[in-house]
Amino acid sequence: MNKILITGGAGFIGSNLAVKLLSKGYQVTILDNLSPQIHGQSPETASPLYLSIRDKVTRFIKGDVCDPETVKEALAGQDAVIHLAAETGTGQSMYQIEKYTQVNIGATALILDNLTNHPHSVKKMIIASSRAIYGEGKYLSEELGPVYPEARPAEELAKGKFEVQYPGCSKPLQLVATDEDSKIHPTSVYGITKQNQEQMVMTVCKAIGIAPVALRYQNVYGPGQSLSNPYTGILSIFSNLIKHNKEINIFEDGEESRDFVYIDDVVDATILALEKKEADGEVFNVGSGVPTSVIQITEQLLKEYNSSSTYRISGNFRIGDIRHNYADLTRISRSLGFSPQVTVQEGIHRFASWVKGQPVQEDNYSKSLKEMEQKGLYK
């Protein structure tokens, strides 16, 4: 397989992946609509992500992954598809439900419909799934063993009760790594669409003789990530706030944790999934395998920037947010030989070093929170 189509290939993950694939001799076609939320208002002249691949890729198609003719054109002659194009952001998905469903589910259905009903040369399809499909992570109960708590009730969060509970458990639950066989129960529309994407690809591709692979990415970060997109992740959001000398509002009690995985590790895992036959028909977590709290992230960022900015632990919360989740990497390590090479501490240092050289971006974060508050999704 030499000819690779990356949908959403001008985005953060896609552009880094394209550069690495090109360096390995692949021919790379990118289909991307250069969304202003990611690339700004003048993407073709001012988007660093787009400019990083514009003159390097074999072919760039500016178009909508929801357009049948564009998708048909992009698929022609390809050996493999890496489907990254999607609307992202758990918070935004809770009030842009039709858009997230149309882009994430509809476009995936369109690609699969095309592959099912028209001649093609595609042999493998990789779908960018997400840790969001798990909802809350996996826990151990002294009384019940492994348990998977449901979404936390808003009335409990409003009382400052942020840790998860599980019926029949009187003792505190112990957080453990979430493996691929864990319960799938997303708590956001974004997570639901990612679950649907994954299931469609794994089901349809197997039926029509294409090798499917699903990669459940954790919280991806690194140099090049948008600093103006308020739905791109807390490292970019908090870095932008620090550059504006604004106070950081830490939700809940700051002890909520995620698995932050560096972009280079994500690219390496994706290429392993593309190149190794052992990946065919499988689902893999892609992460660092380490939980890191929001307070830990905030304090390292402040130290990296030598900033006098402050933070406050507000107790605010968003409907649809989870408490904890981090990846069990046993399967991807055993099957593909993947091991993350960049620690969270080193990754944040590299990210902050890059941010220092970037111009200050517009702060859109407050606006995004206000939109959620108006819809009753931010308290």
Image (cartoon, rainbow, N blue to C red):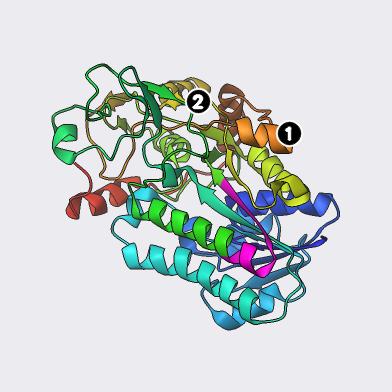
- Membership of 206 in magenta stretch: yes
Q: Residue at x 22, y 45 (%)?
A: 378
Residue 192 seen: yes
Residue 307 seen: no
Q: Give percent across and percent down for residue 3.
A: 79, 64
Q: Quadrant of residue 124?
A: bottom right
Say which mark, if any, is on residue 337: 1
Q: Nearer the viewer, residue 251 or 276?
A: 276
Say which mark, if any, is on residue 273: none
Horizontally, residue 209 falls left or right of residue 262, namely: right
Circles 1, 2 touching at the beta carbon (< 8 Å): no
Q: Give percent across and percent down for residue 340.
A: 66, 30
Q: CA distance from mark 1 to mark 2?
A: 35 Å
Pointer 1 local density, CA inside 10 Å: few below 14, some 14–19, many at least 20: few
Question: Which residue reaches farthest front?
Answer: 144
Q: Amino acid at mark 2?
A: Tyr
Instruction: Report the mark closest to the observer, 1 or 2.
Output: 1
Element under label 2? loop
Q: Residue at x 76, y 49 (%)?
A: 277
Sooner in the amino-acid sequence: mark 1 or mark 2: 2
Horizontally, residue 257 falls left or right of residue 107, namely: left
Q: Residue at x 43, y 32 (%)?
A: 325
Residue named by callout 2: 305
Q: Amino acid at mark 1?
A: Gly
The total number of labels drawn is: 2
Horizontally, residue 349 falls left or right of residue 148, namely: right
Q: Which residues are magenta?
A: 204-215
Q: Quadrant of residue 293?
A: top left
Q: Give percent across and percent down for residue 86.
A: 50, 60
Q: Quarter of the image containing the N terminus? A: bottom right
Element under label 1? loop
Q: Residue at x 60, y 29 (%)?
A: 347
